[in-house]
Amino acid sequence: MTVEGDVGVRQTGTLLCTLLDRRSSVPLGAARITCVWRDNRVSRMDADDRGHFAADLPQGVYDLVISARGYLSLFVRGVGVLGGYRQQMTRALIPGEGKDPEGSPATAIGGYIRDRIGRAVANVTVQANSESGNQSYTARTDRSGAYIMHGVVPDMYDLFVRSGERTLAKEHVPISHVKHFVRMDVRIVQM
């Protein structure tokens, strides 16, 4: 397990997002995105006329505040950016005035799943279950073997890599704070 901030972990990744009106699915071209870094730095970006924005960010975990005139602001906690990976997200805003509740502080878990000789393992399920039984997060690897789980709250987790009903790997992942992205690369010994 590698945590952002460890020596040598400063790769960048790309966060691509499409913003839509929740009721009509029309792109929100006038949306503003405020990205809050874990060291409290702030970056601001504007969506293009098709509701898209892209940001190259250091591997890490960020909170996003997405706002547009005439819509409720959306606060998305624990968005992970995995180094060397282009992540795509879609978010929809609800017409109205005011703000949504902020939610609990959260982080993200992400990494790459590889086989014993280092090849990407695509289309497997990665699931993190809290030992307390209160939280469960699931992601699927893409063709590069990458996965990311957003909005993960602190707890002790068992991380499973599964293909169908078969468990390929199990790792223990303690998350005690939300300041850092938790990078968990897994190598599958037997497929």
Image (cartoon, rainbow, N blue to C red):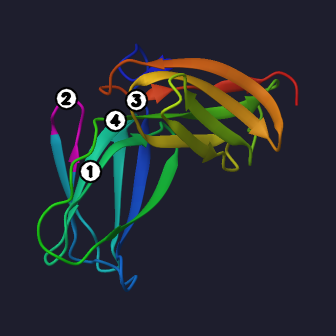
Among the two numbered marks 3 and 1 on one chain, the one whose residue lies closer to the N terminus: 1
Q: Residue at x 41, y 40 (%)?
A: 80
Q: Which residues are magenta?
A: 35-41
Among the two numbered marks 1 and 2 on one chain, the one whose residue lies closer to the N terminus: 2
- Residue, disc 3: 181
Among the two numbered marks 3 and 4 on one chain, the one whose residue lies closer to the N terminus: 4
Under circle 4, the secondary element is loop
Q: Residue at x 39, y 26 (%)?
A: 154
Q: Position of residue 169 (x, y in %)?
A: 75, 25
Give the CA distance from mark 3 to mark 1.
Answer: 15 Å
Q: Within the magenta stretch, is there residue 166? A: no
- Residue, disc 1: 64
Under circle 1, the secondary element is strand
Give the CA distance from mark 4 to mark 1.
Answer: 12 Å
Among the two numbered marks 3 and 2 on one chain, the one whose residue lies closer to the N terminus: 2
Give the class, few, some or many, for how many residues have Cα within 10 Å of label 1's Cα (few <14, many ≥20).
many
Under circle 2, the secondary element is loop
Q: Quadrant of the C terminus?
A: top right
The mark closer to the camera, 2 or 4, is: 4
Give the CA distance from mark 1 to mark 2.
Answer: 14 Å
Asked if 186 appears above or below 83 in the picture, the reply is above
Q: Position of residue 74 (x, y in %)?
A: 25, 60
Is there CB contact under 8 Å for labels 4 and 1? no
Q: Position of residue 181 (x, y in %)?
A: 40, 29
The mark closer to the camera, 4 or 1, is: 4
Residue type for callout 2:
Asp
- Decide if residue 91 is on the left or right side of residue 82: left
**Marker disc for residue 106:** 4
- Residue, disc 2: 39
Among the two numbered marks 2 and 4 on one chain, the one whose residue lies closer to the N terminus: 2
Q: Position of residue 144 (x, y in %)?
A: 67, 45
Residue type for callout 1:
Leu
